[in-house]
Image (cartoon, helix red, strand yellow):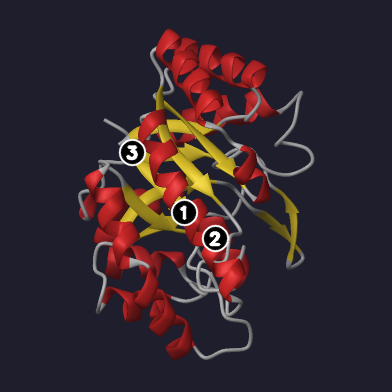
């Protein structure tokens, strides 16, 4: 397994993060975009790649978040799928190993309807991604994604087994689901892992500090990852108003690295 973290998207921030990663033994940076993905150009990606190469850091993943690939509106769906195709091209140019995206969502529709539309439109993009040397990992429980349960993934795997999970244990816990059950039963489908901590107080999310300072059972997470032979990235996610920003952002990264590092060979 390899440790990385979610980087900033501006070129100045990318260079600072790449330098920090190289100095402290992080192997990869992840880059995520929401609606602003449509503004990302091939020229910018080339500059990003050059900065990473300068410091010997890989692109662990490119994320395209919030786009609705199965929107009932044909025009919205067409635009989303066009951007998904572009994401595959840009991820390949960046040298990323994983493309992160959601499943899309048909509002107020059944799981069956969502799965039916997903398996209708998604296979060509999985094939394109694989031809580009990429795996697609779908995120869950937020951001225009019908993957809000283990069952949603299971239903898709019946027809598209090579769609993976972008696993964020903290998000699953906050949604009220058991991330350890997912790992135990389907760890072979986990393609990418976010390391984000949640600390709860009186039933409410009180902080998002460094890994090991909250309620996520990282030792158990790592145990199941080892049992399933996971060899991908563990991408630390600076998040929240306190630990996700300066001056604690880099402190969070280093403390998380120290805690997760105890489970790495």
Q: CA distance from mark 1 to mark 2?
A: 6 Å
x and y, in percent, of residue 257 in the image:
48, 29
Secondary structure of the residue carrying tag 2 is helix
Residue found at x 49% / y 55% = 82
x and y, in percent, of residue 112 in the image:
43, 90
- Count of numbered circles in the view: 3
Residue found at x 47% / y 22% = 46
Instruction: Tell me which numbered mark, 3 or 1, is placed earlier along the sequence.
Output: 1
Report which residue position mark 2 lands on: 80
Residue 178 image label: none
Residue nearest the viewer, comparing 94 with 203: 94
Q: Is residue 78 above or below residue 258?
A: below
Q: Quadrant of residue 61?
A: top left
Secondary structure of the residue carrying tag 3 is loop
x and y, in percent, of residue 30 in the image:
49, 35
Instruction: Tell me which numbered mark, 2 or 3, is placed earlier along the sequence.
Output: 2
Q: Is residue 84 above or below residue 255?
A: below
Circles 1 and 2: CB atoms closer than 8 Å: yes
Residue 97 image label: 3
Q: Is residue 193 visible?
A: no
Q: Is residue 75 left or right of residue 241?
A: left
Report which residue position mark 1 lands on: 84
Q: Is residue 145 left or right of residue 35?
A: left
Crowding at label 3, few (<14), some or many (≥20) Cα neighbours within 10 Å? many
Q: Is residue 162 above or below residue 181?
A: above
């Amino acid at each position: 397994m390899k440790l990385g973290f979610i980087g900033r998207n501006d070129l100045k921030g990318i260079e600072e993060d790449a330098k920090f990663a190289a100095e402290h033994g992080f192997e990869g940076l992840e880059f995520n975009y929401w609606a602003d993905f449509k503004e990302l150009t091939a020229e910018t990606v080339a500059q990003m790649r050059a900065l990473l190469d300068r410091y010997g850091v890989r692109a662990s993943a490119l994320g395209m978040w919030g786009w609705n690939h199965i929107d009932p509106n044909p025009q919205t769906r067409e635009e989303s799928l066009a951007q998904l195709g572009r994401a595959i091209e840009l991820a390949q140019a960046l040298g990323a190993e994983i493309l992160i995206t959601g499943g899309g969502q048909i509002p107020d529709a059944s799981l069956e309807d969502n799965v039916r539309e997903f398996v209708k439109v998604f296979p060509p993009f999985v094939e394109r991604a694989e031809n580009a040397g990429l795996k697609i990992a779908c995120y869950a429980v937020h951001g225009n994604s019908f993957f809000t349960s283990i069952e949603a993934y299971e239903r898709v795997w019946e027809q598209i087994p090579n769609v993976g999970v972008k696993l964020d244990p903290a998000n699953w816990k906050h949604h009220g689901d058991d991330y350890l059950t997912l790992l135990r039963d389907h760890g072979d489908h986990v393609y990418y892992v976010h390391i984000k901590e949640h600390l709860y107080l009186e039933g409410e999310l009180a902080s998002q500090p460094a890994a090991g300072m909250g309620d996520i059972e990282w030792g158990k997470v790592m145990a199941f990852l080892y049992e399933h032979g996971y060899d991908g990235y563990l991408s630390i996610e600076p998040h929240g108003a306190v630990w996700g920003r300066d001056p604690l952002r880099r402190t969070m990264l280093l403390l998380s690295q120290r805690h997760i590092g105890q489970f790495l060979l």
